[in-house]
Image (spheres, helix red, strand yellow):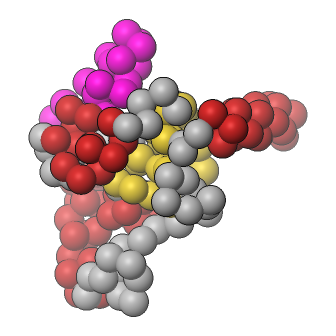
Amino acid sequence: MPNIEYNNMYKASEECKIHDWVLSFLLDSGNNHKLAKKLSEYSQFHFGPVNYPISDLINLVGPGKMYHEEQSVLDSRVDAMIDSINNGWKPAPLIVTNIWNDSLEIADGCHRQMALKKIGITKYQIIFYFKDQYSLDNFTQEYMQYLEFEKHAH
């Protein structure tokens, strides 16, 4: 199974063009034009991709959530992703933001997060977008503390 988006993301990261990749991904295979437009306004406040815990991120998709999806439809989409992952597909990174709220919400990748969690993956590549420099600086400091903790925990 091709990993074109995942590989393109890494290439863009190495070339310091991750924001361009995010917009390109969202306008093409990510099919999230509204998010691409919104993130284009916050281009200077991004961080990543980084391997980060996915369990505590706020997922907005599902029954009774902001983006309602029937459980049967949700399960079908997640199970199809799991099948693809089991056949070698690497999902695109999650895109997480605090633009709309002060908490870290998954803006793109809710189904990917569910599939990854369901197969026991606890950390995955994430690209963060923040509403301002203050939020970016605070997160960067917290992330560095997290890395230091992880280093000593192993």
Residue 42 is one of the magenta-drawn residues: no
Is residue 25 left or right of 96 when viewed as pictured?
Answer: left
Foreground residue, 49 or 81?
49
Q: Is the magenta stretch mostly helix, strand or loop?
A: helix
Q: Which residue is drawn at 36% across and 17% down?
A: 17
* Residue numbers of the magenta segment: 1-22
Q: Which residue is drawn at 28% across and 28% down?
A: 21
107 lies above or below 75: above
Residue 11 is one of the magenta-drawn residues: yes
Is residue 45 left or right of 119 when viewed as pictured?
Answer: right
Q: Residue at x 50, y 52 (%)?
A: 99
Q: Which residue is drawn at 33% across and 64% down?
A: 111
The answer, for residue 133, to whether it is visible in the render is yes
Residue 125 place in picture, x, y as percent: 47, 39
Residue 62 place in picture, x, y as percent: 35, 80
Residue 4 place in picture, x, y as percent: 19, 30
Residue 29 place in picture, x, y as percent: 14, 44
The N terminus - image quarter: top left
